[in-house]
Image (cartoon, helix red, strand yellow):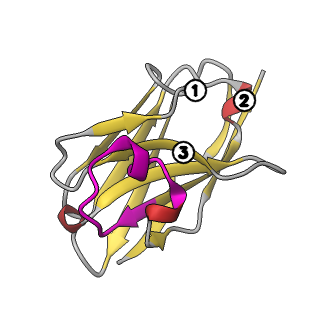
Amino acid sequence: VQLQASGGGSVQAGDSLRLSCAASGRTLDNYNMGWFRQAPGEDREFVATITSNGGMTYFGDSVKGRFTISSDNVKTLFLQMNSLKPEDTAVYYCAADHSYCSRYACLSNKDTYDYWGQGTLVTVSS
């Protein structure tokens, strides 16, 4: 599957953005899907994940209550980001995992994912 993230931009603190991840090659119902982010000089950080059947979602502690993840289970993954903070500034990546994992421990690990999109930059100013 090929992934392409979009929807990033420059916003003010408190604003909202919705990121999209378009898939080609196969439909998303074959994959667990995740969002990660990477700020300059930092490791890639887990943001959110949704299991292949849409039954489970998990979020990183820093975004709980502000971000939601959803999928149309066909071609597009979404990340709705509300109440954005300057510390949310990063390049956001979508990723797909073809395993049978459904637990937070593996789905929050970037090494679990087999396919990655190219990233979209989100900049939040105070």
Q: Quadrant of residue 30?
A: bottom left
Q: Is 114 in front, or is 105? A: 105
Q: List x then y, in percent, for residue 74.
A: 19, 62
The residue that disc 3 covers is 46
Residue occupying the far front of the picture: 105
Return the disc, 2 or 3, that comes first in the chain's sequence: 3
Q: Is residue 1 left or right of residue 63?
A: left
Mark number, residue 62? 1
Q: Residue at x 69, y 45 (%)?
A: 90
Return the disc, 1 or 2, that comes first in the chain's sequence: 1
Q: Residue at x 32, y 76 (%)?
A: 24
The residue that disc 2 covers is 87
Q: Residues within 10 Å of mark 3 (few under 14, many from 20)?
A: many
Q: Residue at x 72, y 51 (%)?
A: 43
Q: Quadrant of residue 56?
A: top left
Return the disc, 3 or 1, that comes first in the chain's sequence: 3
Which secondary structure, mark 2?
helix
User: Are circles 1 and 2 on residues that touch, CB within 8 Å?
Assistant: yes
Q: Amino acid at mark 1?
A: Ser
Q: Residues within 10 Å of mark 2 (few under 14, many from 20)?
A: few
Q: Residue at x 41, y 58 (%)?
A: 21
Q: Amino acid at mark 3?
A: Phe
